[in-house]
């Protein structure tokens, strides 16, 4: 998976590649898809949601230029796989998931693998996680129509955010950086993520 899907497409950060080698992706993919865990595609994880394609996980992780002292916020815990990748590289990971069943399962999986530096919150990630802000990096794995203001606010000075932005069919991955209190942003890749929704299922 790492050689054929990730390195071949240009991801080269050693810490990212090592994390992708270490984390057992098959333990995050539920039956009946477990056997396909290392294939080059997203897979269903329940509640109509998906675990992202391995390459996209690696690409987004590399784009954040993480260091071992970073505190990271993830919006859209899903299976918990991306959180585990972040936890291998960073100091601590705070991850928010809208669906209680997914949050609970992700928590159990991460716990059984011994990740002590990941906190899972069941809630609406549009609001971020103000109690633990500011964050050195923010990764969003569901797509709103615009970058949520609370997430911009919770980014530390010098912090980076990677986020898919757009409607159901056309989205771009944006990389944002907070410099001197100002947000700089540019688009890096066309993508397709599940929408960011509120508790009533309405798209943000
Ligand atoms: N990062 C995940 C993949 C997530 S798919 C992994 O590694 O498996 C996107 C996730 O975002 C879904 O689980 C979906 O339920 C969640 N989501 C959608 N809207 C949300 C919101 N407002 N707050 C938090 N999570 C949300």
Image: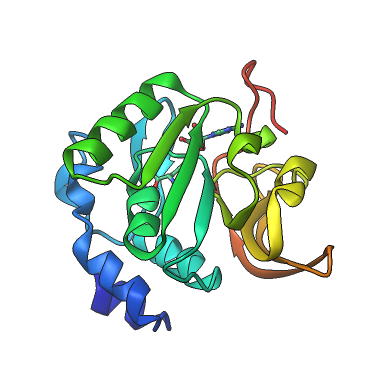
Q: Is residue 146 left or right of residue 89?
A: right
Nearer to the camera, 31 or 22: 22
Residue at (50% x, 64% y) in the render: 60
Nearer to the camera, 159 or 17: 159
Query: In terms of image quadrants, where is residue 51?
Result: top left
Q: Is residue 3 left or right of residue 203?
A: left
* Quarter of the picture holding the C terminus: top right
Q: Position of residue 85 (x, y in %)?
A: 34, 58
Q: Position of residue 14 (x, y in %)?
A: 34, 81
Q: Position of residue 172 (x, y in %)?
A: 67, 60
* Quarter of the picture holding the N terminus: bottom left
Residue located farthest toward the top when viewing the structure as drawn? 200
Q: Is residue 59 left or right of residue 126?
A: left
Compared with residue 3, is residue 152 higher up or lower down, i.e. above or below?
above
Query: In terms of image quadrants, where is residue 77?
Result: top left
Nearer to the camera, 27 or 154: 154
Compared with residue 52, is residue 50 higher up or lower down, i.e. above or below?
above
Residue at (14% x, 47% y) in the render: 35
Residue at (58% x, 41% y) in the render: 132
């Amino acid at each position: 998976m790492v050689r054929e899907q990730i390195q071949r497409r240009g991801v080269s950060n050693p810490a990212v590649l090592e994390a992708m080698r270490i984390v057992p992706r098959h333990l995050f993919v539920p039956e009946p898809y477990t056997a396909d865990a290392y294939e080059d595609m997203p897979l269903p994880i329940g509640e109509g949601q998906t675990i992202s394609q391995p390459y996209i996980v690696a690409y987004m992780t590399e784009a954040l230029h993480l260091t071992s002292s970073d505190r990271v916020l993830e919006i859209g815990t899903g299976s918990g796989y991306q959180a585990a990748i972040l936890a291998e590289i960073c100091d601590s990971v705070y991850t928010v998931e809208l669906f209680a069943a997914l949050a609970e399962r992700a928590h159990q999986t991460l716990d059984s693998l011994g990740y002590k530096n990941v906190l899972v919150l069941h809630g609406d990630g549009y609001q971020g996680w103000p109690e633990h802000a500011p964050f050195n990096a923010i990764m969003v794995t569901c797509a709103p129509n615009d970058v949520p203001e609370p997430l911009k606010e919770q980014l530390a000075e010098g912090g980076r955010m990677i986020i898919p932005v757009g409607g159901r069919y056309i989205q771009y991955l944006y990389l944002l950086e907070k410099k001197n209190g100002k947000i700089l942003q540019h688009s890096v890749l066309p993508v397709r993520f599940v929408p960011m929704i509120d508790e009533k299922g309405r798209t943000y």
